[in-house]
Amino acid sequence: MLVSSFLSLYASLVLSIDAIKIAASPSDPLSCNINAVLSCGKVASSWQSQLLGFPNSFIGLMTEPVVITVAIAGLGLVAFPRWFMRVAHVVYGLGLVFALWLLSQSFFVINALCPWCLLVTGSTITVFATITRVVLLENSWNFAPERQEKVVAFLDKGWGRVIYTGAFASIVIAIFLKYGNELFA
């Protein structure tokens, strides 16, 4: 969670700097414009990149330091109240939905992928999977004992990792199926 949130913060910083560059000089190419498919500039010039009226990357600059703080506190064995973990789970779940929506827009509407945005999406999946695992193992949602036993057994058997790996594999396979050799052109 800590490593992923640092990577996402770094990507958000790079994307924010690029957004400022685009605002200053829209015709200048960005360093991450690799080809027609891997094109930060094409993604950054779309309306989806500024959904709330400012660059989406600014959201990462605001939220990732909070995630980093929670991750560091967790490493320090801080026990958060259940209400806090529930809120963190729901809010990060909304962040995941937003990241996946942005990915779908890049994939199906913009027809270009931003490598930094892909890093943010991957990091968001990783952090959400981590928060979900912690919330479920600590029974933050107050499941009945029988249900909690089943949840813990499910996670102990490694099914959480299967879902997590399947999510990444699905994204990678979809990208290669849609773009194939264009990724390396």
Image (cartoon, helix red, strand yellow):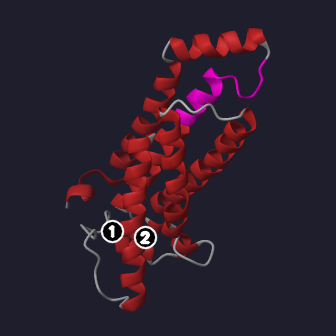
**On the picture, is 143 further left or further right than 131?**
right
> Pointer 2: residues within 10 angstroms few (<14), some, or many (20+)?
many
**Which is the main secondary structure of the residues drawn in magenta?**
helix
Residue 135 sits inside the magenta stretch:
yes
State the count of labels. Answer: 2
In this picture, is 21 found above or below 147? below
Disc 1 designates what residue? 39
Report x, y in % for residue 167. Answer: 47, 36
Query: In the image, what residue type sits under mark 1?
Result: Ser
Name the foreground residue: 39 vs 66.
66
Residue that appears at 62% across and 31% down: 79
In this picture, is 142 found above or below 16? above
Disc 2 designates what residue? 43
Q: How far apart are marks 1 and 2 (CA)?
A: 7 Å
Residue that appears at 77% across and 23% down: 142
- Label 1, secondary structure: give it: loop
Report x, y in % for residue 102. Answer: 53, 59
Residue 139 sits inside the magenta stretch:
yes
In this picture, is 8 found above or below 56? above
Report x, y in % for residue 4. Answer: 41, 45
Query: In the image, what residue type sits under mark 2?
Result: Val
Image quarter (top left, top right, bottom left or bottom right) of the C terminus: bottom left
Confirm or deny contact between disc 1 and disc 2 (CB under 8 A).
Answer: yes
Residue that appears at 37% across and 52% down: 7
Range covered by the magenta-colored residues? 129-143
